[in-house]
Amino acid sequence: MSFFKKNKEIIILSVGGSLVYPNGGIDVEFLSKLNVFVRSHVEKGRRFFIVVGGGAISRSYRDAGKAVIGKITNEDLDWLGIHATRLNAHLLRTIFQDIAHPRIIENYDKKLISWKEAVVIGAGWKPGWSTDYDAVVLARDYRASLVINLSNIEWVYDKDPKKFKDAKPIKKTTWDYFEKLVGTEWIPGTNAPFDPVAAQLAKEIGLTVIVAHGSNFRNLERILNGESFKGTIVTPVQIDDSFYDREYFEGKKGEYRFSYTESFVGSAIQDVANIYRAWWIKTFINPKTCLDVGCGTGKLVYFLRKLGIEAYGIDISEYALERAEKGVKPYLKEGDIVKIPYPDNSFDLVVTIDVLEHIERQEIKKALTETVRVAKKWVLHKVYTAENKWINFFHAKDHSHFSLHHQSFWINIFKSLDTVMITRKTFFHLPSFFESLFLLRKK
């Protein structure tokens, strides 16, 4: 039996119609590159929902209708645009016909059951919103944590760059701020970086959306690989210094039904979990030295030291470190996973417990590289993945889970690291229902 379940990562691409049909006709070069790109990632085990817009062809039909009768209702304008998206969708369906689901999604109430194809094409649905909204519906219904919105712009700006020379690009923002930029109402033909109605639904379900230029496939590659990229990230919450304050650590922002330090039950659960983890590390790896990245109050460090392992910890939360017990405090220090304050090859084992799912996608590769850099032999990552269904019993919705993916996502990321290999040696582990463990060995 394979150590990992083969749930494939789902990528949702909202492809702006302007990329397929800009002014002047169909962009065959773009479609050819899209074809090569998608197929290359299908070979890596990824699956794609590709929802396509109408582009210039939809505007041509709208303009023609207005020219003949002078005024067209919003509903008819929407229907003209919707049928244009369906024409573009059939073109994409033809391109991917050997690996695509036979049905183009035109009704998003009809969910796919046991679909096996690598690609599914979606088109416009009904008046009132754009294909951006359809992409968000897919993310909600198929448990994808990310939508990549591909358009003809590299960034979202604080105002229209075509009208204002002082317009500034926005690299990262929240749905609350985005709402101020685009409003809350959908108007047919609106040239917004993301549909306002789609933005409302994305905010409601806690979705992250990346807006990037669709013709830059190297940049898109970096997005999928968890590297830094050009594009605007819109998230449910803002990550800044205050994000790691007392309320977040105590679990009052919605993540934990039992807080870590104030609740007796919560504290007891954490003790049991860390005793088990310390025993597991001692039994199956038995390192002389260990670094716990994202150590919190240092409980794992404490139990590892009780078992004779020279353990240390770092955490970005000053508040968490202050609440550590006196006996373990000397072995803890403040530090960020993307810039670990230790030299190369400092520890036999570097471990993270439920840290990586909180890392924003563009920082993942950097964070993993840092954990490998300071490790001599082993890197152990326990990551909350979509397979870990048990967590729903104890956790409420946590908008800080920016990187909640299937195990296959992490396997692809780990395989992209040149200096480590995934170890599948036989050892005791809990089923995927409970946890996802990834043990990496330095080459």
Image (spheres, grey):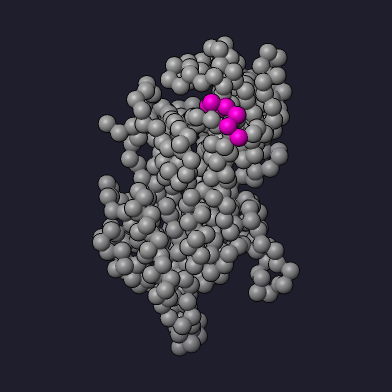
The x and y percentages for residue 107 are 34, 59
Asked if residue 348 is among those painted magenta in the image, a careful observer would answer yes
Q: Would residue 12 be found to the left or right of residue 329 on screen?
A: left
The x and y percentages for residue 18 are 48, 72
In the rendered image, is residue 320 in sight? yes
Of residues 355 and 400, the one nearer the viewer is: 355
- Say if 114 sits above or below 261 in the image: below
In the rendered image, is residue 353 in sight? no
Where does the magenta region start and end?
344-350
Q: Would residue 161 be found to the left or right of residue 354 on screen?
A: right
Residue at x 64% of width, y 39% of height:
339
The x and y percentages for residue 74 are 49, 72
Of residues 11 and 121, the one nearer the viewer is: 11
Residue at x 44% of width, y 68% of height:
53
Residue at x 56% of width, y 16% of height:
309
The x and y percentages for residue 268 are 55, 15
Quadrant where the image shows the C terminus: top left
Asked if residue 397 is among those painted magenta in the image, a careful observer would answer no
